[in-house]
Image (tube, rainbow, N blue to C red):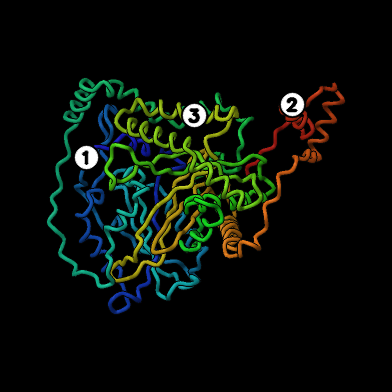
Amino acid sequence: MRQLSGHDASFLYSDSTHANSNVTLIQIYDQSTAPGGIVRFKSIMAHIESRLDRSPIFRSKLLHAPLELDYPYWIEDENFDLEYHVRHVALPKPGDWRQFCIQASRIHARPLDMNRPLWEIYVMEGLDSFIDLPAGSFALIIKIHHAAIDVEHGSEISMLLHDLSPIPPAVEPPKPWFPESPPGILSLLMHGISKSIHSPFEMGRPFNRALSRLAPVALNFVKDMVLKPEFMTSTRFNSVVSPYRVFDTRRFMVSEFKAVTHLVPHATINDAVLAVCGGALRRYLALHDELPANSLNAVAPVYVRAADKAANARPDVSWLRVSLATDVDDPVDRLRIIQHRTSSSDVMAQAIEASELTDIARHAPSATLALASKMLARAATEGGVRMPLANCTITNVPGSAKPVYLNGARMTYFSAIMPIHDGMGLVMAVTSYDGRIVISPTSDRYLMPDPEVFSQCIRDSFQEYLALATMPAAKRPKAPRPAKKAKPAQAPKLAVARALVSGIRKPRRLTARMAATALRLVQGGRRQSTSPSD
């Protein structure tokens, strides 16, 4: 019996009726490399069954402590049914990419059965109309709850089912498995009370459980009171989400991203990815006439290594807010700004500090809200300007650097659909596999009704960088010298608002609050919503 950490349990407590914390890995295979050129569903079932003993998460379900005195536990499911977790589906004809994305999004959005092990695998066929894929390709859609998977090292779960050779090993008969009996309620109750007494950090565990469940509400309240929404630079994605998801993707070569990094000295592939995502977000919002004047930010992982850890130890992952420089039109300047900010000593110091605080929070539940409060306070006062935590999330899900095989079928594509929540309605998953980088946006169906347009913006943003990277340096357009900022032209409605205010009284300077009040009068007494209509 294993207990969830406070970090993993927080994903359970953040689930709601319209937003769950499912992570979905999407993998597509070419079965022509398999022996005989065919991989049947029953052979995939037998293969998965032979690998169940490689990770306890496959047969483990949740057991909640009485009165929420302790974090939940993983216990073995006495009624484990493999046929429930592995399912066989097919796309209707013509079976094109748009249909696949819609079906994968629906699978991802459906909540998992919390009384069973928190994973499902869908074997999907009917991908006959996919471009650049061999005939007969099939997909594996692996859905697992965030509490059961470490996203930054999520490929480890995937690798349990794969081999590095197209010649599959002989399928061994499943090993005998006898599930452990779950502990009794009285035993769990006494264990929770004992931990609360002997550990000073655990004294307020029932209170901490309530705080953990109320964390989303508490954070929204703090943002409303401290960050002042009227001072936020927000977009359509910083809104309440529905239960419906959209997903799309674009594929690139790692070598091409390396060429982009040469545009700016010391730029990394991560910097180039952030710059491409920033350019895509700028293009998409500009198409909808919603591009803010200020730069938008993303929550992105920063990898840091503590001084007391061994050189070959896995680095800690800290999540920090990074500017995407969406207010910069020149792509090279955007990459230069991002490289400067991600490499600054201040950012790395914050990453190390946040990593240490996160480690404390994982062992002390009461420190979780302290960490959140500190990050909120930093976001609220940074640079003397009140800002939101972030406008979107960009997360990295690394895969294998070499080709991998499932029953001899070679994986040709690897991407991910990530969870979104209220206030954070856009996540871009960046997956890497076999020399390719895939950028996959996940959003809400109402916040992004045209995911294919957003993915095209990603492609256009990348092509703009690639064209500059492959152009001789002498022919690249030189960045213009910074000129004096011209006074922005007034929008018609804002001009009317100014005239209305000046007609009432003539202030020396029109404040933002006065303009907003007058603008509401011009618009019929209501503030117009920027979210798309249902």
Q: Tag 3: residue type?
A: Leu
Give left or right: position of 242 versus 169. Answer: right
Residue 2's tag is: 1
Q: CA distance from mark 2 to mark 3?
A: 26 Å
Q: Is residue 499 visible?
A: yes
Q: Is residue 452 visible?
A: no
Mark 1 vs mark 2: give the one in front: 2
Q: Is residue 158 above or below residue 165?
A: above
Mark 1 vs mark 3: give the one in front: 3
Q: Nearer the viewer, residue 320 or 169?
A: 320
Residue 227 % position (x, y): 56, 28
User: Disc 3 designates what residue?
Assistant: 376
Please state, as top left, top right, bottom left or bottom right, where the N terminus lies in the image: top left
Residue at 51% x, 61% y is 259
Rate crowding at label 3 as few (under 14), some (14 to 19) or many (20 or more) other CA atoms within 10 Å: many
Q: First in sequence, mark 1 or 3: give its number.
A: 1
Q: Tag 2: residue type?
A: Thr
Q: Secondary structure at mark 1?
A: strand
Residue 412 % position (x, y): 40, 67
Residue 511's tag is: 2
Q: Nearer the viewer, residue 141 or 302?
A: 302
